[in-house]
Image (tube, grey):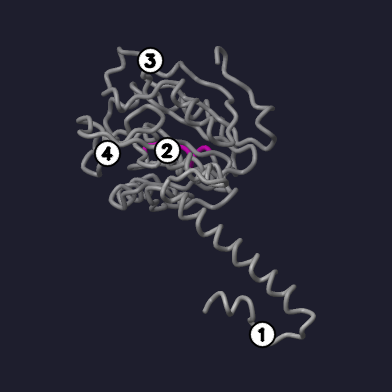
Amino acid sequence: MRLLRAVRPGGPRPRGETGRSTLVALVSCIRRGLALLCAGACVAGLALPGAEPARELASLYEYRSPASPDGIGKFYRGREIARTMSQEGADWLERPEREAEEAPEQVLTALALQPGQVAADFGAGTGYFTWRLARAVGPAGRVYAVDLQPEMLARLRTNMAARAVSNVVTVVATEQDPRLPEAGLDLILMVDVYHELAWPHEVLAALCRALKPGGRLVFVEYRAEDPAVPIKPLHKMSEAQILREAAAHPLEWVQTVRSLPWQHLVVFRKRAHPPDAARSPPGN
């Protein structure tokens, strides 16, 4: 019945038009059927023309069992994704030793934020860096504090109130969507959080969409290259791994700060031009 309606949607036609309109309608039906077939094949992972992007995306992740003690058994570009810290670990985010271990003021200096800018603390936790970002952008600026866990954000709001910080907006994210305004941010900071993202490719794509052209995305991760850094292996990332994963997105490497006590700070800029204009880090 659907084919008959497509061939003759308006009832009988003048004799001179019948053959031509029937042929056009049949071609339209065939095209629609091929599109549906291709879409189904993409979901199933079959190799049909036009299915390449979906197939590539589906193959980004690998699952292995059993998972590592600190991992989720899901692998992305050769690394196992680490378990996310729950709200029960919130006190660790506020530990007194963190000042010496992470040098937050040095991080802020490297970010070089300007008054009036819009930034995001992605994976903000209890707001250890949030209030510092808010101070840097000033009353005319804004900071989005983003986290998966409402309990973390509740504690963050308490911490912001205690410091009389009023230019912070809290956002409850999903595992794949940070829920940030599109093309609205000058900088997004991720401190010790990217390695825990269950969907890193999708989240990075969404973060890129949230950046203004030329906006910066900053990874701060414990150095996997340094065995002296006393952090569990799955909670560390090498600079090479960060560069490898960022390369799948419209990001241009800007610089890597290696002078932090245990971490490196890797800065990317959202490209406003074709990728052949992108800079490469020394040795890559």
Label at residue 10: 1
* Residue at 59%, 36% in the rendered image: 250
The numbered mark, 1 or 4, whose residue comes first in the sequence reads 1
Q: Nearer the viewer, residue 256 or 103?
A: 256
How many marks on residues? 4
> Disc 3 vs disc 4: which is toward the camera?
3
- Residue that carries the numbered disc 4 in the rendered image: 85
Q: CA distance from mark 3 to mark 4?
A: 23 Å
State the residue in front, 176 or 75: 75
Residue located 20% across and 33% down the image: 66
Identity, as a three-letter code, of the amino acid under mark 3: Glu
The segment highlighted magenta reads 128-136
Q: Residues within 10 Å of mark 4 (few under 14, many from 20)?
A: few
Q: Nearer the viewer, mark 2 or mark 1?
A: 1
Query: Which quadrant: the C terminus?
Result: top right
Residue in the foreground of this view, choosing between 236 and 189: 236
Measuring from the top left, give residue 184's x and y in whole percent: 58, 49
Dots 2, 1 in contact, CB < 8 A: no
| Amino acid type, label 2 | Ser
Question: Is mark 3 in CB contact (under 8 Å) with mark 1?
Answer: no
**Gap in Å between the C-alphas at discs 3 and 1?**
70 Å
Disc 2, SS: loop
Give the residue number, with chain letter if any, for mark 3. Answer: 225
The reply to whether residue 164 is in sight is no
Residue 227 drawn above or below residue 73 = above
Position in image of residue 125 (x %, y %): 34, 42
Closer to viewer: mark 2 or mark 3: 2
Q: Is residue 132 magenta?
A: yes
Q: Earlier in the sequence, mark 4 or mark 2?
A: 2
Look at the image and say whether residue 112 sits in the magenta stretch: no
Between tags 3 and 1, which lies in front? 1
